[in-house]
Amino acid sequence: MSRTIPGSRTVTVEVAPGVPMTAAVLGPDSGTAPAVVLLHGFPQTHLMWRHVAPALAADHTVICPDLRGYGSSGKPDAVTPDTYSKRTMAADTVALAAALGHERFALAGHDRGALVAFRAGLDHPGAVTHLLSLDVLPTLDMWDVLHGADARVAFHLYLMAQPPGLPERMIAAVADEFFAGFLDGWGADDRAIPADVRAEYLRASREAVPSIVADYRASAGVDVEHDRADRRAGTTLAMPVTVIQQDWGAQLGYDAAGLWGEWAPDLEHRTLDAGHFMAESAPEEVTAAIRALLRR
């Protein structure tokens, strides 16, 4: 792991055959305190939790992995559509926590990590006790609300949904510019991601183009299939859920709280004016939200 959260210890667990998952762990030794797993977003690594994780570690074991395909974790070839499905990545997360002594844990995710957390909550309700999502909609709803010219804000979703080959070559040709565009354009505070952290995100993303694209490609295919199956079956999130988002609903014309409410009967939904990278620009608010969720 090239760059990690100060004061953490690094663990690596083989969560699937040939797929190591590397995580920073803070707080009491595994199994002696309740666990909170924090999943990062795009184009980041577990380092995005560098403010939130230490604040939670006083009374929780805090596990911050790099997702499959990102950072220091394994990057298997996408030999099937399921290789980077959120179902597979959710299973990785459950396997990691169990290997560290936690059959049950609270789960928070940002962006791509929030989609993995959502799928983990649906697939593993016996493992996930509480769920927090930062600044996404569930995959099925995300595609449904993107229409016309307003969808240009999500151009990367369409680019990386294309068949293997061209997207990877296009992004690799200008990798730093491509990933920096999101880091620089989605934030509300330039100071939230300092130069050294920004450089780490760019390095890690530059070295993971094929797996990052595979992750996004899954969200245009197999992940939608899984969400549709759960929608037809009436499957919902059984645990308390908190969702914090920018006010995308007002900008793009949809009811974000209503969409989330169809999936989460026990829902607290609110908006936060802190840009997309809110765990870095507003860590105190995010930490407080996690602590409030854990009391529900």
Image: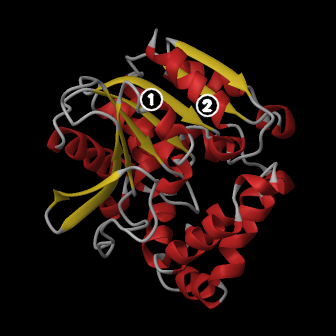
Q: Nearer the viewer, residue 188 or 121?
A: 188
Question: Helix or strand or loop: what does disc 2 sit on?
Answer: helix
Write the residue at 72% across / 80% down: 177
Residue 60 in view of the camera: yes
Query: In this figure, which residue is indicated by the disc labeled 1?
Result: 231
What quarter of the picture does the N terminus occupy?
bottom left
Q: Is label 1 or label 2 in front?
A: 2
Above or below, 295 relative to 52: above
Write the residue at 60% across / 16% down: 268
Q: Nearer the viewer, residue 277 or 240?
A: 277
Q: Position of residue 119 (x, y in %)?
A: 39, 38
Above or below, 213 relative to 113: below
Q: Nearer the viewer, residue 260 or 293?
A: 293
Query: In this figure, which residue is indicated by the disc labeled 2?
Result: 286
Question: Helix or strand or loop: what does disc 1 sit on?
Answer: helix
Q: Position of residue 221 (x, y in %)?
A: 46, 57
Q: Position of residue 115 (x, y in %)?
A: 48, 43
Asked which colour scheme the image uses, the reply is secondary structure
The Cα atoms of the two marked residues, 1 and 2, are separated by: 29 Å
Label 1 is placed on what type of residue?
Arg
Which residue occupies the extreme front position in the image? 7
Q: Are marks 1 and 2 in contact (CB under 8 Å)?
A: no
Specify the quadrant of the image occupied by residue 43.
bottom right
Residue 163 in view of the camera: no
Q: Characterize the local packing of mark 2: few (<14), some (14-19) or many (20 or more) Cα atoms within 10 angstroms.
A: many
Left or right, residue 216 beside residue 272: left
Label 2 is placed on what type of residue?
Val
Task: Compare marks 1 and 2 and give the one earlier in the sequence.
Answer: 1
Above or below, 155 relative to 103: below
Write the residue at 81% across / 57% down: 190
